[in-house]
Image (cartoon, helix red, strand yellow):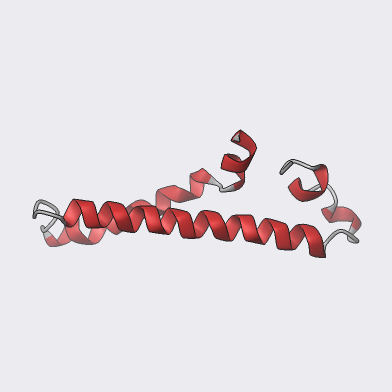
C-alpha cells in the first residue's frame, strides 16, 4: 500500500492547498460552507492529480520498455506489484 501511496506523489498535493487562498484573500473563508466546499475542491484536485500520475506511470512503463535508460523506472523495477 505504501508503494501505491508514494506513486501518487503526495508532496505534489501541497499545491492543492491554493484552493483555500481565494476565499481567504476575499475574506469569505469564515462564511458557512466555504471551508467545506474548499475542502471538497482540495480532495477533488488531489484525486485528479494522483490518478494522472498513476496513469502516466503505467503509460510510460508500457511505452518505454525498449528504451534501455528508462528500464530503471518504477514500472520496470516492479515497484507497483
Residue shown at 86% from the left, 54% from the top: 69
**With 51 as the anchor, is 73 left or right in this view?**
right
- Residue 72: % across, % down: 82, 47
The total of numbered circles placed on residues is 0
Please state which of residues 44 and 30 is positioned toward the viewer in this rendering: 44
Residue shown at 55% from the left, 57% from the top: 51
- Residue 52: % across, % down: 57, 61
**With 9 as the anchor, is 61 left or right in this view?**
right
**With 2 as the anchor, is 33 left or right in this view?**
left
- Residue 71: % across, % down: 85, 51
Residue found at the very far top of the displayed protein: 2
> In what quadrant of the picture does the N terminus appear?
top right
Please state which of residues 11 and 53 is positioned toward the viewer in this rendering: 53
Residue shown at 74% from the left, 46% from the top: 74
- Residue 11: % across, % down: 50, 44
**With 46 as the anchor, is 18 left or right in this view?**
left
Name the image quarter holding residue 58: bottom right
> In what quadrant of the picture does the C terminus appear?
top right
Residue shown at 79% from the left, 42% from the top: 78
Please state which of residues 81 and 76 is positioned toward the viewer in this rendering: 81
Amino acid at each position: 500500500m505504501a508503494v501505491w501511496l508514494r506513486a501518487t506523489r503526495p508532496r505534489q498535493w501541497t499545491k492543492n492547498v491554493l484552493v483555500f487562498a481565494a476565499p481567504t484573500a476575499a475574506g469569505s473563508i469564515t462564511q458557512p460552507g466555504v471551508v467545506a466546499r474548499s475542502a471538497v475542491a482540495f480532495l477533488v484536485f488531489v484525486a485528479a492529480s494522483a490518478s494522472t500520475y498513476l496513469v502516466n506511470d503505467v503509460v510510460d512503463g508500457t511505452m518505454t520498455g525498449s528504451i534501455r535508460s528508462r528500464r530503471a523506472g518504477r514500472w520496470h523495477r516492479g515497484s507497483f506489484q
